Image (cartoon, helix red, strand yellow):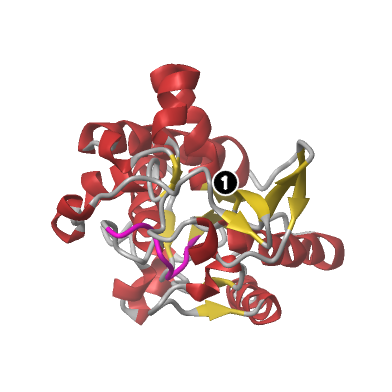
Amino acid sequence: MTDKLRIAEMTSAEAKENLTEAAVVLLPMGSLEDQGVHAPMGDYLGAECVALDIARKAREYGVPTFVAPPVPFGGRDCFQSSLGGITLSQSTLAAVIDDMVWSLTRHGLKKILIINGHGGNVTAIDQVTARWRQEAGVIIPSFYLWKAAYGLLIDMFGPEGAAERSGHGGDPLTSIGLHYYPEILRPDLITDPASDDLAFMGLPVASFNEVSYDGAPIQMPIDAVEAAPHGIRGGHPKFAAAETGKALSQRLSEIGAGLIRDHIAKGFPG
């Protein structure tokens, strides 16, 4: 088997030799949006790095695993207000995912795992993967990295420690960045999370797309910049560390590779 992990780096001859029906293909996805004044806008960078580590670990288990080029543009949501950001409508993103899956499956590559790094992608992923199951019997799981990482932070630091770290512009993504690509982060620009006294239309902002009224959460069409002027909401990025990112990436890689070994590589026999 070739040492190359990225499909983009393989020659066509290597692809014919290695991309057999036994191969597992990882599809990393993310977004290009405000991740905080200190962090690079492309969270797909982290998703691709974790995908590569998952592939390495899966190969240690004897499963030929390869990584497709990442989808860098996320599904359109409240972060469309990010200067320099690029988003895709949900219908366009769904069409892109669908075409990617079609391109792989037409050559017999049906062992696919989506490595997702953006909440705005979930709707399109769910829509496409449900259709492929219903119409073609192809099961495509999606591993939403940062959602899983929030739970891992609780394991690492306890509920209170995780709460002071976890949030948009904080962990897990800032620590992931400090682990994989510290040279492009700007820790000197770190600032405090959004204030609790932000309001939208006279109502207190509770979260992205959400206000509070009489103790109840109410969905509202709030732009991200209105909920987090500096891209940071929730936990403080000052607690982020490369050591945390390393521990998170190792655990995420173990989970992803284990899923590949135990289920995806076997074709979900049931």
Residue assigned mark 1? 265
- When the figure is inspected, residue 59 is found, relative to residue 84, above or below; the finding is above
Q: Specify whether residue 22 is in view.
A: no
Depth check, front residue: 214 or 13: 214
Q: Quadrant of the C terminus?
A: top right
Q: Secondary structure at mark 1?
A: loop
Residue at (47, 67) in percent of width and height: 31
Residue at (62, 39) in percent of width and height: 263
Q: Position of residue 4 (x, y in %)?
A: 28, 62
Segment tinted magenta in the rendering: 27-37
Q: Position of residue 156 (x, y in %)?
A: 39, 21
Whether 178 is among the magenta residues is: no
Q: Position of residue 225 (x, y in %)?
A: 49, 65
Using residue 182 as the reference point, say whether residue 244 is left or right of it: right
- When the figure is inspected, residue 45 is found, relative to residue 171, above or below; the finding is below
The secondary structure making up most of the magenta span is loop
Depth check, front residue: 132 or 184: 184
- Quadrant position of residue 46: bottom left
Residue at (63, 71) in percent of width and height: 101
Q: Residue furthest right?
A: 134
Q: Residue furthest front?
A: 202
Using residue 71 as the reference point, say whether residue 113 is left or right of it: right
Depth check, front residue: 39 or 232: 232
Whether 33 is among the magenta residues is: yes
Q: Position of residue 233 (x, y in %)?
A: 46, 48
- When the figure is inspected, residue 164 is found, relative to residue 170, above or below; the finding is above
Neighbours of disc 1 within 10 Å: few (<14), some (14-19), many (20+): many
- When the figure is inspected, residue 9 is found, relative to residue 62, above or below; the finding is below
Depth check, front residue: 81 or 62: 81
